[in-house]
Image: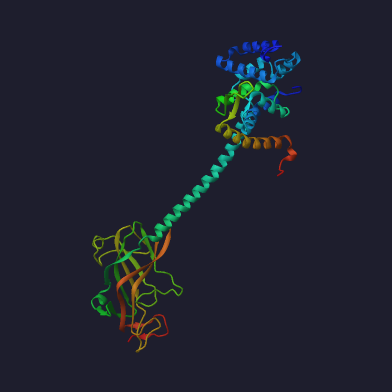
Amino acid sequence: MAGDSGGLTELRRGVLGPCVLALLELRPRFGLELVRDLSAADGLLTSDGTVYPLLNRLRDAGLVTSEWRDNEGERARRYYSITPAGHQSLKRFRTDWAQFAATVASVLDPRDRGKP
Amino acid sequence: MSGTALEHRLVREYLTQLDVAMGSLPSAKARELRSQIAGHLEDALPPDASDEDVAAVLHQLGGPADLAREAQAGAASGVGAAVAAAARRGWVRIIRSRLRTKLIVVLIALLLATGATFLSIFLSAQLPNYVGEFAWWYPQDYNHEVDSTADGAQQTTVLIRSGQWQGFGIGIYNSSNFTETIIGPPVTEDGRWDSPNGGTQPRIEVSAPDRAIEHGGFTRNVAFESLPVSIPPHQYRLLRITWITDVCILGGTKSNNMLNDGYQSIDSIYLRVRVGWFTRTDVIPLDMAVALAGPSHGVYNGPGPYHGTCY
């Protein structure tokens, strides 16, 4: 992405996992479906391919599981689902993120400091 | 035109480059990622996709080397982990703070619980009690005491010796598991003490440890200590109460200090006793009434409006 700083790329990469979990929390999804939903959130996904290594890491961490499904008239696809551990991880991240985002915002914009 | 997008020339080239880029990955991981990328391309591209469409999808997918690098990256990489770590550090501070607060609350609760426990223990501890040993202290009294029974109640009576020392001793026992300290008689509003003497506070003393007393006996050959005196758990002592008698029967009437016509008596002794952190009033019932009675002897110059030779 033009104009991207390395920091922003790192930030995207860092939050991508929880975002994947958040989408899978709604319902199981196959790879391209996930990619399209993530791409719909503008600026979140810089390259589609990064989703797959990420899914594998999430699976290795026990946060995501996958299964092959044969849908009638379509080719078999691998669907990814969030696990109970994934739910817990996402819950923790949401709490952490809210605090972290507030902290960063207060540092980036000192005028907001002290506001309720 | 081909059966699936996987047979497209650009796709095949891409997958070949990907295989090469993933050369350093474990083969299982490499196979898995290749399968995922291939599936993605199958879903993303129709079998008859144009070169432009394929190129666009491949471009959006990212370069094979980038994908391989991404696959090789550790799970802990990324800002998410850093965010979580930073947040955890924040939480650690909060948790530490909360733990500190909780610790303080727990300590206070423990102190209160301990205090309440000690309060309960100290307030329920048995105070020194009378063990049945009684004797008038001075020979003029114990040689002339009169024991009587009226309506089933016993009474020991000696004559009033106005202006002279009179008193008695009793055996007491600390049956509790705590050292108990006799501080003195209860302080009343008018400063009076409920003694046969009628009003003047007596001298109260406690014996030093003594073998005869320790076996439940009574002896006058013992040293006494002035209050406050501590009695260790499960020990006997003599409690000596003496006074200069200031009651007198004057010409058929009574002095101000006489509460009854011709005699005064008590059947309990009141003491202030400290147990642990608390001071309590110990009421020691005697098994008889202890009385001073007329006729009185001597000259009365004590409190009250009446003075002169006792009757």
Q: Where is residue B255 in the image (x, y as percent from the top left)?
A: 38, 84
**In the image shown, does B186 or A83 lie closer to the viewer?**
A83
Q: Position of residue A25 (x, y in %)?
A: 62, 33
**In the image shown, does B9 or A53 lie closer to the viewer?**
B9
Please give the name of the residue rendered at 28% of the width and 79% of the height, measured from the top-left corner.
B158
Q: In which quarter of the image is residue B301?
A: bottom left
Q: Position of residue B55 (x, y in %)?
A: 73, 15
Residue B89, visible in the rendered structure? no
Q: In this view, does B291 lie to the left or right of B22?
A: left
Q: In this view, does A44 lie to the left or right of B125?
A: right
Q: Quadrant of residue B286?
A: bottom left
**In the image shown, does B165 or A105 lie closer to the viewer?**
A105
Above or below, B118 against B68 in this view is: below
Q: What number of labels is visible?
A: 0
Q: In this view, does A54 lie to the left or right of B187?
A: right
Above or below, A11 against B241 in this view is: above
Residue A33, visible in the rendered structure? yes
In this view, which residue lies farthest toward the bottom? B251
Question: Is the N terminus of chain B in the top left, top right, bottom left or bottom right quadrant?
Answer: top right
Q: Position of residue B122 (x, y in %)?
A: 40, 58
